[in-house]
Amino acid sequence: MRNSKITNFYTKVAVIMNTNTRTHEHTNTRTHEHTNTRTHEQQIISQPCLICSSKTNYYFSKNYATYPGSPFKEILNVDYYKCEECGFVLSQTHAKMSENDWTQLNTSWHHHFEKNPESNTTHNQPPYADQALALKLLSKNGIININDTLDYAAGYGSMAKVLKKYFNINISIYDKYVQDIESDLTYVQDRELKKYKLVVNSAMFEHVLERKHLDAVNDLVDSDGTLMLHTVVCEKVPADPNWFYITPIVHTAFHTNKSMEILMKQWGYAASIYSPQAKSWFLFKKDSPLINDFEHIVEAINRELQTKYFHYKNGFVDYWKGF
């Protein structure tokens, strides 16, 4: 998650699928997993996969305790559904919340947990310094064009500030809801948005409830451009209510290597690079300049750094295979 200043982004980025709400009454306050025993009716009403439109099935549930400011005064039971084709997992409970409940949940959760460090055991900021270094390395070697870059949903521009201060690189940033008016960063307004050679998106893909919010990011990437992406992508989302990435109650969407491979093809990307240090993927459109030389360039960079800083693959770099 980003720092607490960009809370407003998370509270507004997800437009609710419908206005139905689901209420649950529980006497057991223990977090637990349910077996896949949802009724036939519930299976039918589950929404299709946001990635591949295949059928989704009930996967598991998690109970979230209430906290000061939560719109849910009792324990909230959240049902997660999994795509039977690509493995993408989405919270159906969040998708069916009213807009008011979803907004209040985001606002109150970020305020309560990020303002109370002793209660926050999930503080896991994007590695801004390593992301900036990765951008500099790829730019220096001609793999990306950092001179035409947009950081989308950038909030108060944490990474842009690192790039500017330590690498003397200025990039444009966009956030629909918040801006750091005291900084000298280059904010882009809605009417100024265009196609970019490089679009950066960090820690947003796990907060979406509708496909159009994913497509909005890709729509800004030029036909020969690059999308830099920071989120968790794994081989299989575990059916575990104690999995670290669902600890934040506002994390709703979870991507797999297969779902990302499908998404890449749908969007016209042909190859990717992953940096474990930056925890970021770089997705390249099929018409990217020098794409046929990327593998050799990456090998040369790794030799120079004497470590495997970058991983290259035609298609999606399925780096995380252990879970």
Image (tube, rainbow, N blue to C red):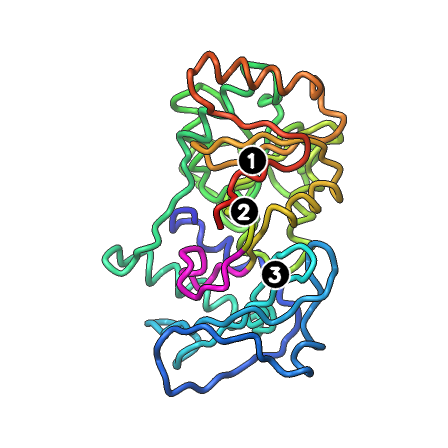
Q: Main secondary structure of the magenta part?
A: loop
Separation (CA) of disc 2 from disc 3: 17 Å
Q: Are marks 1 and 2 in contact (CB under 8 Å)?
A: yes
Q: Which residues are magenta?
A: 237-252
Q: Secondary structure at mark 2?
A: strand
Label 3 or label 1, whichever lies nearer to me, is: 1
Residue picked out by circle 2: 233
Q: Residue at x 40, y 65 (%)?
A: 108
Q: Say which of 273 and 307 sits in front.
A: 307
Q: Residues within 10 Å of mark 2 (few under 14, many from 20)?
A: many
Q: Position of residue 99 (x, y in %)?
A: 57, 70
Tag nearer the camera, 2 or 3: 2
Q: Amino acid at mark 2?
A: Val
Where residue 69 appears, as percent x and y from the top left, is 37, 71
What is the distance, in whole Å, between disc 1 and disc 2 at their CAs? 10 Å
| Residue 209, disc | 3
| Residue 243, magenta (yes or no) | yes
